[in-house]
Amino acid sequence: MEKLKILVVDDESRMRKLVRDFLVRQDYEVLEAGDGEEALDIFYREKDIALLILDVMMPKMNGWEVCREVRENSKVPIIMLTAKSDESDELMGFDLGVDEYISKPFSPKILVARVEAILRRTNQIGDSSQIKKAGLIVLDKTAHEVTIDGKSVELSFKEFELLEYFMDNQGIALSRERILNSVWNYDYFGDARTIDTHVKKLRSKLGKQGEYIKTVWGMGYKFEVEA
């Protein structure tokens, strides 16, 4: 089976090497570009790139410009890297069709996990654990769908990830900080109480099964299905 190609675009060679080394260890083929123009040249030449990792601040063409042009021609998954933690930047990225947005500095392991999650979601790599079940809840990672007793439940992307994390950690008391680190990734500079808001919405959408998510006072939450 051919290795999936990932194009890493960053004007810092040290950053490209760091990302490349971690991706190569996971058996990906990594292509590199030091600016936006070079990135587009490689993208059009190679044709079969599975995913782009784009830095925002680059010479010649910045990441937004590259993303805009790529999106005119392709739906290839795109992860944006930025030194800023500006919400307006993040919103612009999603408006342009960015699949994931990660602020520097970041953990390379987290980046690789995001890459693999996106590639699974776009059915470019398989996963033996695509279907997760807990009580009446069935979570299908391939279809990105949740059903309760056979009826579909509409969840946002983060609600889906939060539910999946809970289902993967059944019976374990999880602090808000741990949930933030795992679902929002470690560089999320938000109030840990944002978890409460998402849990409230998730519980509401799950109906009676929302009771599976139990509050651990003074700490966080625990997902537990009653026998």
Image: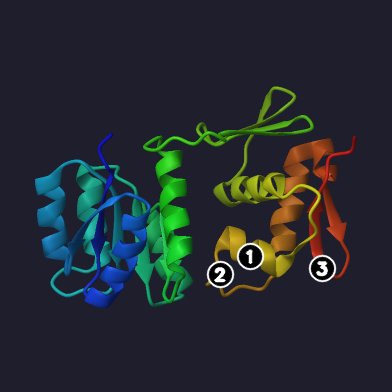
Q: Is residue 48 left or right of residue 26?
A: left
**21 or 198, which is in the foreground?**
21
List the residue tagged with mark 3: 219
Check if mark 2's residue and mark 1's residue have beta carbons within 8 Å: yes
Residue in the picture at 14% in, 56% down: 40
List the residue tagged with mark 2: 186
Label of residue 180 in the image: 1
Residue in the picture at 69% in, 56% down: 198
**Crowding at mark 1 (Cα within 10 Å: few <14, some 14-19, many 20+):** many
Residue in the picture at 47% in, 55% down: 113
Rendered location of residue 59, percent (x, y) = 16, 75
Rendered location of residue 199, percent (x, y) = 74, 54
- Image quarter where the N terminus lies is top left
Quarter of the figure with residue 175: bottom right
Mark 2 or mark 1: whose residue is earlier in sequence? 1
Quarter of the figure with residue 209: top right
**107 or 58, which is in the foreground?**
107
Q: Amino acid at mark 3?
A: Met
Above or below residue 77? Residue 148 is: above
